[in-house]
Image: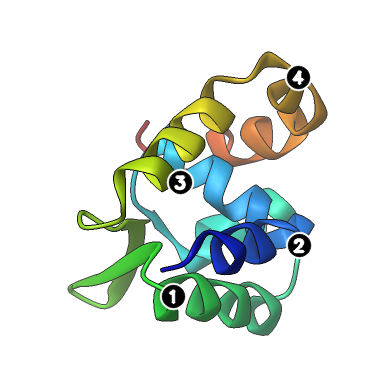
C-alpha cells in the first residue's frame, strides 16, 4: 500500500468513520457499522470492501457473521496514523454520536 492510496481512502468520511470505530472498538460486523453510522448496508459494505482490498482491513467469518478488523500486516507508518486518529480527541468529539450508537446496540460487547 502506497501512502497516497491510504490517504485517498481516508479522504472519504464514511471510510474514516468505519476505520475510527474499528480502531477504537475492535472487530465489528457490517450490521454494527450500519447502525452506528446510520448508513445503508450496501454503502457500508462497498466502503469496507475498498478498505479490505487495499489491505487496511481484514475480514473473518465467525458463524454467520463477518467481522472486519485492522489488518495485521499493514505498514508501520499507516498503523501509527490509525492509532493517532483513534486517540484524537478532536475526532472523538466530531464522531461521538457514532460511538454512542455503537455502544447502544444490543449484544455489542466492547
Comes first in the chain, label 1 or label 2: 2
User: Which mark lies nearer to you, 3 or 1?
Assistant: 1
Give the spatial CA distance, label 1 vs label 2.
14 Å
Q: Nearer the viewer, residue 4 or 79?
A: 4
Give the spatial CA distance, label 4 vs label 2.
17 Å
Q: Quadrant of residue 59?
A: bottom left
Label 3 near label 4: C-beta < 8 Å?
Answer: no
Comes first in the chain, label 4 or label 2: 2
Comes first in the chain, label 3 or label 2: 2
Label 2 near label 4: C-beta < 8 Å?
Answer: no
Specify the label residue 90 is tagged with: 4
Q: Which residue is mark 3?
A: 22
Give the spatial CA distance, label 4 vs label 3.
17 Å
Q: Which residue is mark 2?
A: 12
Give the spatial CA distance, label 3 vs label 1.
16 Å
Label 2 near label 1: C-beta < 8 Å?
Answer: no
Give the spatial CA distance, label 1 vs label 4.
26 Å
User: Which mark lies nearer to you, 3 or 2?
Assistant: 2
Instruction: Say if 95 sits above or below 89 in the image.
Output: below
Residue placed at 21% from the left, 54% from the top?
Answer: 72
Amino acid at each position: 500500500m502506497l501512502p497516497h492510496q491510504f490517504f485517498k481512502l481516508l479522504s472519504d468520511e464514511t471510510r474514516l468513520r468505519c476505520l475510527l470505530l474499528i480502531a477504537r472498538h475492535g472487530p465489528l460486523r457490517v450490521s454494527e457499522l450500519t447502525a452506528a453510522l446510520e448508513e445503508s448496508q450496501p454503502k457500508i459494505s462497498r466502503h469496507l470492501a475498498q478498505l479490505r482490498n487495499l489491505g487496511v482491513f481484514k475480514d473473518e467469518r465467525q458463524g454467520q457473521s463477518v467481522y472486519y478488523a485492522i489488518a495485521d500486516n499493514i505498514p508501520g507508518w499507516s498503523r501509527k496514523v490509525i492509532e493517532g486518529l483513534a486517540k484524537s480527541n478532536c475526532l472523538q468529539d466530531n464522531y461521538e454520536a457514532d460511538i454512542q450508537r455503537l455502544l447502544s446496540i444490543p449484544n455489542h460487547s466492547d
